Image (cartoon, helix red, strand yellow):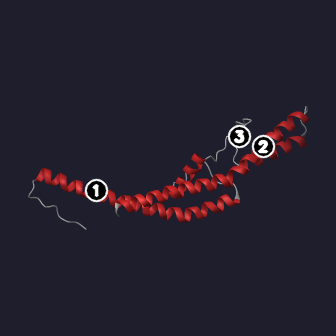
Amino acid sequence: MRCTTLTTLLTGVMLYLGMGALVFVTLETPKESEAHVNLLRAKQDFLINNSCITEVDFHELVKKLVSAIEAGLDISNLPANLTSRWDMGSAFFFCGTIITTIGFGNLSPRTWFGQLFCVCYALVGIPMFGILLAGVGDHMGTVLRRAVAKIEKLFLGPDYHHPTVF
């Protein structure tokens, strides 16, 4: 594979990662933000309205907590301002773990559309990354073969002809 083809393919993969990250941010951030607002509202309402906790009130709070956890919030640290897990950097990293089939697992889409997009994204991205990886391997193999031939000529003399192996 020529170097220009490899560079074009690498650029295409990077653009694909950026596009995927943008889609995931667009799909996932609203649900995460809504869950954060709902949880803060439930916490505030609970503290204002309940000087003595009843069982019904407690169960309502637990339902809100479960909803927030399902949306992907970390409830152990609940600041007043949401720091979204779906920023561009995190989404770009997530897209990279998808197309490389690493699947790191610290972030995953929670919305139905996000999950559906993830499957479609992987179906295109995994083969695209595989082609890029094959091209890089081919290019590196060519460079390595030339380097070995030069080293052998250096140590074995200029009359030595490297056998051609296909």
> Upstream in the sequence, badge 1 or badge 2?
2
Q: Would you identify the image quadrant in which residue 49 lies?
A: top right
Residue linked to disc 3? 82
Whether residue 101 is visible here, answered yes or no, is: no
Q: Percent from the top left, x then y, of residue 53?
A: 89, 35
* Horizontal arrangement in the rendering, residue 110 relative to residue 105 (left or right): right
Q: Estimate the spatial distance between the alpha carbons at disc 1 and disc 2, rounded to whole Å.
A: 55 Å
Q: Residues within 10 Å of mark 3 (few under 14, many from 20)?
A: few
Where the N terminus falls, by quadrant? bottom left
Q: Which mark, by number, is residue 37?
A: 2
The answer to whether residue 106 is left or right of residue 11 is right
Q: Assign a secondary structure to mark 2.
A: helix
The quadrant where residue 136 appears: bottom left
* Pick the front one: 105 or 85: 85
Q: Which one is in front, 101 or 149?
A: 149
Could you tell me residue 153's position as x and y percent? 14, 54
Residue drawn at the location 64% of the way across and 45% of the way down? 85
Q: Are marks 3 and 2 in contact (CB under 8 Å)?
A: yes
Q: Farthest residue toward the bottom?
A: 166
124 to 106, vertically: above or below: below
User: As rendered, which of 81 and 52 lies closer to the eye?
Assistant: 81
Please, what is the three-letter code of the amino acid marked with disc 1? Val
Secondary structure under tag 1 reads helix
Q: Amino acid at mark 3?
A: Leu
x, y percentage for residue 99?
52, 58
Q: Is residue 56 left or right of residue 163?
A: right
In the depicted structure, whether residue 164 falls above or below residue 102: below
